[in-house]
Image (tube, helix red, strand yellow):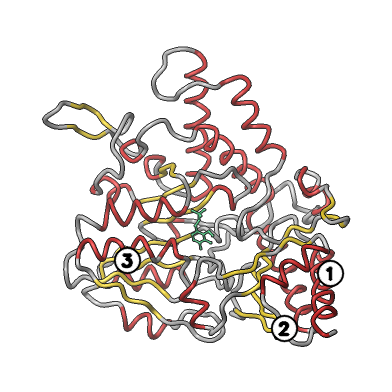
Amino acid sequence: MTHAQGLSPQLAGNMFDVERIRAEFPILAQTVNGRPLVYLDNGATSQKPRRVIEAIRRYYESDNANVHRGLHALSERATNAYEGARDTVRTFLNAADRREIVFVRGATEGLNLIAQSWARPRLQPGDEVLITTMEHHSNIVPWQLVCRQTGAQLRVAPIHDSGELDMEAFANLVSERTRVVAVAHVSNALGTINPARQIVETAHIAGAIAVLDGAQAAAHGPVDVRALGCDFYVLSSHKCYGPTGMGVLYGRAELLEAAEPYQGGGDMIRTVSFEESTWNELPYKFEAGTPNIAGAIGLGAAVEFMTELGMDAIAAHEREVLEYATERLDELDGIRIIGTAPEKAGILSFVVEGVHPHDVGTIVDQHGVAIRAGHHCAMPLMRRYRVPATSRASLALYNTRADVDALVEGLHGVKEIFDR
Ligand code: PMP
């Protein structure tokens, strides 16, 4: 990830006051199975701070109306709030223009939109789409679909055992046939932070577009789409402390202008007749129908929350907790961490010798610790490591060393049961 400068003014001299931050998340103050909740499933979805919940409540209590249509006061307030969220996201990603910020349902919809609206009309037999072994199904299947529709070929760049992308093999797979390179900014199952700038540059030299799946990146460090140079970037609101059913597609205006609409309906048109319709300007061309207004407002509040804390400070805090967690897990016998790249975000995938990950998840839940177990929507990656599944602890800005200690205690519980 690109790193901006310094801590935010709020945190300068105050360091990362994690207890104060935790108090902003009402859900964390509960017990599960008689133990204080330790939430380590942030890769799946993050919890929501009070201000996000309040922003959504306030919208429904006082401003609810449809956007872009009504001339009445409520509709004007709803439109301002919805469009204000777009400006907030534009600043967050450092996009050049608010027209480049399209609100979608999530990272999944963003990737499908790129595949269908930009790639489908352009790909031809002989063309190639290049992804990597570590992709989430959301960055595999949309490309498989469009390859089937167009006769293009899906190519896959391999990874090293550490979970780092094999950059030499990647570069060798990029050729004049490559039209699209689509790579996770951060891997959801390994935590690897990919060298996104280098990937984008390699794609561009060959004349391909570069798509970054930022679902696991955007909440964990600064993202600057112009510094990255990418053509498209997607993120999910619900992994960024915002509501579900909401996401962002960033696309360079030139590419969005040239792309076909994704869905037809209200708001995305300029004129409609039975013979022919014409399209609205960006970004509305891609926002057919009544959008997720409350979702956008909630995401806007979440982005403001993260920005105030400072993305560099969040990254530094999570890195510190990750280092501690890695050390603690390394001390345990019979545990293998999957994904040991030097550049890692706060994701710890592991297998416990002789114990199915689902059993690990169930037992640590008895200790109040929420982790995930499964293939993490990355079946080809599991195959690469010859495991059916892993257990995964994934960090957010509110996690602490004490959370890691609770996980380790839960893992001792697993070993006690299985060593009997
Ligand atoms: N890409 C990655 C790397 C992810 O981790 C996820 C969510 N697990 C997605 C894409 C899809 O995100 P969503 O389900 O929110 O659309």
Disc 1 versus disc 3: nearer the observer: 3
* Label 2 Cα neighbours within 10 Å, binned few <14 / some 14-19 / many ≥20: some
* Label 1 Cα neighbours within 10 Å, binned few <14 / some 14-19 / many ≥20: some
Residue 408, horizontal then vertical, whole percent? 81, 73
Q: Considering only order in the chain, which callout, 1 or 2, is on the residue closer to the N terminus?
A: 2
Question: Are discs 2 and 1 less than 8 Å apart at CB?
Answer: no
Question: Are discs 3 and 2 less than 8 Å apart at CB?
Answer: no
Amino acid type of the residue tagged 2 in the rendering:
Ile
Residue 381, horizontal then vertical, whole percent? 49, 76
The residue that appears at 46% across and 12% down in the rendered structure is: 72
Q: Which residue is mark 1?
A: 405
The residue that appears at 56% across and 73% down in the rendered structure is: 192
Identify the residue at the far right of this view: 34
The residue that appears at 55% across and 61% down in the rendered structure is: 216
Q: Quadrant of residue 212?
A: bottom left
* Label 3 Cα neighbours within 10 Å, binned few <14 / some 14-19 / many ≥20: some
Q: Considering only order in the chain, which callout, 3 or 1, is on the residue closer to the N terminus?
A: 3
- The CA distance from mark 1 to mark 3 is 42 Å
In the structure shown, which secondary structural element does the residue marked by tag 1 occupy?
helix
- Is 15 rendered above or below residue 64? below
- Label 3 CB-ligand 1 distance < 8 A: no
Q: Quadrant of residue 207?
A: bottom left
Q: Considering only order in the chain, which callout, 2 or 3, is on the residue closer to the N terminus?
A: 3
Residue 217 badge? none
- Label 2 CB-ligand 1 distance < 8 A: no
Q: Which residue is mark 3?
A: 144
Q: Quadrant of the N terminus?
A: bottom right
Residue 194, horizontal then vertical, whole percent? 50, 72
Identify the residue at the far top of this view: 72
Q: Which residue is mark 2?
A: 335
Amino acid type of the residue tagged 3 in the rendering:
Gln
